[in-house]
Amino acid sequence: MGLFETIRSVFGTNAESDATRAADPEDLFGMSTAYMTMEADLGYDHAGEAALCFSGVDSTAFADAVDEVEAILDAGEAETGTGFHQHTDDHGYRWFVLEDDDPEDLVTSVHFAADTFVESGFGSRLLAAVFGFETDDRRAYWIYSFRRGAYYPFVPTGSSDRDERVEFKLQSVLESELDVEDDESYWYPLWPDASGDHPWE
Amino acid sequence: MEWSTDWGLRGRMAFTMFLLFALYLVFIAFLLETGMISMGGAIVFMGAFSFIQYYYSDKLALRSMGARTVEPDEAPELHRTIERLSQQADLPKPTVAIADTQVPNAFATGRNQRNATVCVTTGLLNTLNQDELDGVIAHELAHVKNRDVMVMTIASFLSTIAFFVVRWGWLFAGDDRNAPPVWVAIAVSLVIWMISFLLIRALSRYREFAADRGAASITGNPSALASALQRIDGRMDRVPSEDLRQEAEMNAFFIIPIRSGIIGKLASTHPSTERRIERLRDLERELETA
């Protein structure tokens, strides 16, 4: 425990300062090369979709920020053809879901959206960026946790089980190029609502 | 999304801790001066006792509440709620427990973030909607994040010893003619214990305000926690008191303490619900006007 953390503990402000700490979306660009490695070394095709998960704030300024992200993604759609839609999951968390056959465009759009949240002062509301992959028989995800500033793999089998063996394999292959969360207790699942769906469906 | 720093709250917290620290220094000086430190063995014993209590705080609290830990397949929705909020709070997922009582309440315990347990009562699950439940659980996670079990254990340690002297000091009446009579030691310890008791309770109330702010930061929705507090408070008045008596000791860890007419405002572990709601409304206002 460092000095600042000790002081924050004394004043009971750890929760507040960590929950309001802004995210750093620059790490998202690491996914560009990861997409290639996933295909070349592991045989995973990209799922053509990626998504940004965030928790809402009960305020007008936040609604404005969401509108702004929408406007930016609209502009991006006209330019690169990256489609998008919004989704609210069963837990009340909100998603921007992006669709494109070019992974590079997916990464750029997710970064744009995340950056816009940060610029509007709501970077702390970003929970995760989720990048989808698939083979013939399974789906896998790389999740970027904005709270931790690190990636972790997520391979759901059904709607409440995960294949840890495959996850560790993904970790060991991608470890050299992605900043992978080494504490597995932070590998939070983002379960799909129904088996076989994406977490954002 | 950031709130302006509540310097008043920090100032009061620092001042309380300073007073407590000064008080404890006086107490230690007194023990050394009067030779009461010969009770060293007893102090070591109390220290070990406090440590064990701290180390097993999660299990002790769960047992005294009659709560049981639940696995994800038993309570999938609750687990997912806690997962998301822990993720937002940047905490490893705590153990999840449910206490089977109609009193709507929640508490968090455990010596550190890795050994934390969040417990909710079935009454809470039945009373609140999802947003309100998020607020209450975020409040408990804020306690974990702020290390409140550790802070309160350290803050109360010497107070426990003072209490021990008050209770058992007469056993240590020695033959040493130079030492002051044991009733002096007991009287001084009693004063120290009473003052430290009030200070510790004040500190506990400030930690509640801090956890409310933490919860608002985690959920981004201060008014949901406010309405949860209001709803729990309203329900509490209607619960028969027989159920409450046995739970009185657990008060310090509850989101809202159980009412008691005898305990005054100064001795209460939690600020009044009205004041907490007022503070949450301030945060809500800040969201709209900042």
Image (cartoon, coloured by chain):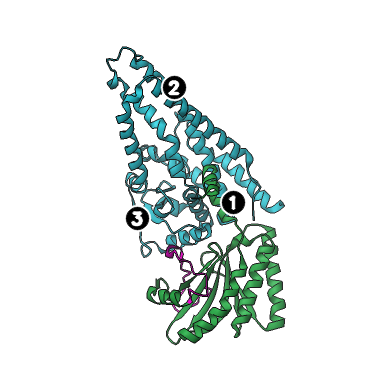
Q: Which mark is residue A11?
A: none
**SS class, disc 1:** helix
Chain letter for mark 2 = B
**Residues at marks 3 and 1, common chain?**
yes
Any part of residue B258 in sight: no
Q: Are marks 3 and 1 in contact (CB under 8 Å)?
A: no
Residue to which mark 2 is pinned: B191
Q: How many numbered circles does the render carry?
A: 3
Q: Chain in green?
A: A
**SS class, disc 3:** strand
Q: Nearer the viewer, mark 2 or mark 3?
A: 2
Residue to which mark 1 is pinned: B222
Q: Which amino acid does label 1 sit on?
A: Pro
Where is residue B263 drawn, in percent x and y? 45, 30
Q: Does the stretch in magenta take in A181?
A: yes
Q: Which amino acid does label 3 sit on?
A: Thr
- Distance of label 3 from label 1 (alpha carbons): 28 Å
Where is residue B258 drawn, in percent x and y? 44, 39
Q: Does the stretch in magenta take in A154?
A: no
Q: In which quarter of the image is residue A72?
A: bottom right
Where is residue B279 drawn, in percent x and y? 61, 43
Q: Main secondary structure of the magenta part?
A: loop
Q: Is A162 placed above or below B198 here?
A: below
Q: What residue type is labelled 2?
A: Val
Q: Chain B is drawn in which colour?
A: cyan
Residue to which mark 3 is pinned: B69
Within 10 Å of the Cα at label 3, are there few (<14), some (14-19), or many (20+) other Cα atoms?
some
Of marks 2 and 3, which one's residue comes earlier in the chain?
A: 3
**SS class, disc 2:** helix
The residue segment tinted magenta is: A174-201
Instruction: Look at the image and tell me in which quarter the N terminus of chain B lies.
Output: bottom right
Of marks 2 and 1, which one's residue comes earlier in the chain?
A: 2
